Amino acid sequence: MFKNTAMIVFVIYFNPSDSPGNYVVRRFAGMVADEFPVITAASLEEARSVIPGWCAGLARSVEDDPVIVETWF
């Protein structure tokens, strides 16, 4: 019934190599990121503002890349 359904995940990064000094939100469908970021923001609050209300936060893992601030699914 759900064969073609991928989990949607939003990841908030701070200071990634392609946007130094900024927060960047990327949307993933499964393990594949969209071509362009959802937003590039100056603050964490601004970055969080684009996360859909139905999302829940996922705790950081010690294995996460240091530029990952939060993950939402």
Image: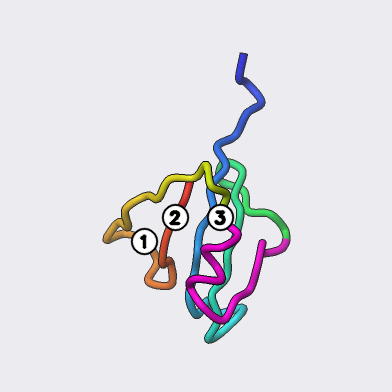
* Residue under the point 42% across and 61% down: 70
- Is 37 displayed left or right of 24 in the figure? right
Q: Secondary structure at mark 1?
A: loop
Amino acid under label 2?
Answer: Thr
Give the vertical position of 15 relative to 48 (above or below): below
Q: Quadrant of residue 23?
A: bottom right
Q: CA distance from mark 3 to mark 1?
A: 20 Å
Q: Which residue is situated farthest in the bottom direction here?
A: 21
Please name the residue that numbered disc 3 is placed on: 51
Amino acid under label 3?
Answer: Ile
- Is 34 displayed left or right of 46 in the figure? right
Q: Secondary structure at mark 3?
A: loop
Sort mark 2 into few (<14), some (14-19) or many (20+) by Cα contacts within 10 Å.
many
| Sequence-first disc among 2 and 3 | 3
* Residue under the point 72% across and 59% down: 35
Please name the residue that numbered disc 1 is placed on: 64
Q: What percent of the width, then of the height, locates residue 49? A: 56, 63
Q: Which residue is situated farthest in the right direction here?
A: 35
The total of numbered circles placed on residues is 3
